[in-house]
Image: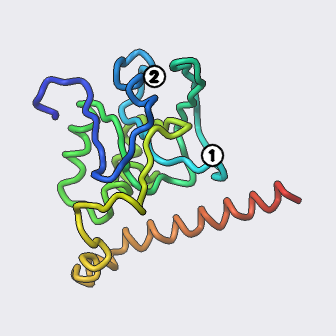
Amino acid sequence: MVDSGERWGLIFEDDVTLSPKFLAFAASENWIPEEAQLLHFGLCHESEMVDATSQCERMIEGRKYELIRQIKPFLSGAFAYLISSPAAAKALDLSKTIVAPVDDFLFSPLSPFTNRVFAYRVIPALVTTDEVTIVSTIGNRVSELSRSPWWIRHHPYRTYVKAKVWLNRLTAHREIIRAVD
């Protein structure tokens, strides 16, 4: 993609279902914030408590969409995203050795890549997965992961990311309980 001369690349996981509204986003770049380098179209649960550093709104085909720079909870799952050519070059440079899943590398606030690009999330989501009816062509990832060497599965960075996810979920849960009280 970097050498193609194209400004943007659209990446999909193999098991996603696109919203009918997705075509309106794919038809033009006019809705993309000027500073954006990475835009995530994936799942967004309405019950999630989202912290964001900034946001903007866009009207697409009569519906309001928010574009947010999300802090927490960090996204789990790449699903579908739009990446600029300069961001793809940064990702290639920084990913010569990565010790985390690709979605953590791309979207975790702990990732060196995420801290170097302007990443936005589109809400409501334009892409979802239907794990019941769609079978992944990648295979059984759990059994493949269990065959990975111990030092890969227990690398300090992966352990750190898992601890941060757990702490973020705990913090979000406490904030929800405070809001209800």
Q: Quadrant of the N terminus?
A: top left
**Local secondary structure at mark 2:** loop
Q: How is the image coloured?
A: rainbow
Q: Foreground: 21 or 85?
A: 21
Q: Residue at x 31, y 62 (%)?
A: 135
Q: Residue at x 34, y 47 (%)?
A: 113
Q: Quadrant of the C terminus?
A: bottom right
- Outermost residue toward the front? 133
Q: Residue at x 28, y 80 (%)?
A: 143
Q: Foreground: 85 or 17?
A: 17
Q: Amino acid at mark 1?
A: Asp
At which x and y percent is residue 40? Answer: 42, 40
Q: Residue 33 bears which disc, if any?
A: 2
**Residue 100 picture quarter:** bottom left
Per the model, the C-alpha gap separating discs 1 and 2 is 19 Å
Left or right of 78 on screen, residue 122 = right
Looking at the image, is 133 positioned above or below residue 42?
A: below
Looking at the image, is 27 positioned above or below residue 131?
A: above
The answer to whether the residue labelled 1 contacts the one labelled 2, judged by CB atoms less than 8 Å apart, is: no
Residue picked out by circle 1: 51
Q: Foreground: 65 or 172?
A: 65
Q: Residue at x 30, y 50 (%)?
A: 13
**Residue 2 picture quarter:** top left
- Outermost residue toward the right? 181
Left or right of 159 on screen, residue 95 = left
At which x and y percent is residue 178? Answer: 82, 59
Which tag, 1 or 2, sits closer to the chain's start? 2
**Residue 30 picture quarter:** top left
At which x and y percent is residue 150? Answer: 27, 84
Left or right of 150 on screen, residue 24 = right
**Local secondary structure at mark 1:** strand
Q: Amino acid at mark 2?
A: Pro
